[in-house]
Image (spheres, helix red, strand yellow):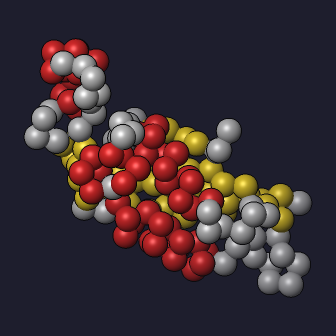
Amino acid sequence: MRITAHRKAHFNAAHRLYRPDWNDEKNSQIFGKCSNPNFHGHNYDLTVSVTGEIDPETGFLIDLKILKDIIKAQVEDYLDHKNLNLEVQEFKELNPTAENIAVVIYNRIKTVLEPKFDLEVTLYETPRNFVTYKGE
């Protein structure tokens, strides 16, 4: 029997969406206000979903304290109150869109999560704008 456990998290970060090979006019046309040269911030909400089999000994899919600690180390400590473009290695070359942030979060969590689990991350940039990534 497969089941999914979810853990919510939150972090704040600033970013600028732009491509250095485009001029300011094209960046503004494509990315709008998100291309502000002085950056802008979001209060990101995150849901991390882990799917697998219930352990017959413990009755847990995963100890949610373990999942909480993984999220804190791999996401909150890494991204919270950071300028993604300037302070986060993955975004030195990668445009920090919600889509790309979700993939980075997924990859960081997946590396420390037991391989027996399937992982899905849902990242809310705003209450109405969000993306989901399952590693596919």
Residue 81's image quarter?
bottom left
Answer left or right for 61 relative to 126. Answer: right
Answer left or right for 56 relative to 101. Answer: right
In depth, the one of 121 and 112 nearer the eye is 112
Q: Residue at x 39, y 39 (%)?
A: 94
View extreme (left): residue: 38
In depth, the one of 18 and 101 nearer the eye is 18
Give the image location of residue 33, x and y in percent: 18, 28
Give the image location of residue 133, x and y in percent: 58, 42
Give the image location of residue 16, x and y in percent: 23, 38
Residue 34's image quarter?
top left
View extreme (bottom): residue: 57
Up the image or down, 34 lies above or below 57; here it is above
Q: Residue at x 46, y 37 (%)?
A: 99
Q: In this view of the protein, can residue 92 be seen by the observer? A: yes
Q: Residue at x 57, y 61 (%)?
A: 109
Give the image location of residue 134, x and y in percent: 64, 44
Classify the position of the C terminus by image quarter: top right
Q: Residue at x 36, y 54 (%)?
A: 89
Up the image or down, 29 lies above or below 17; here it is above
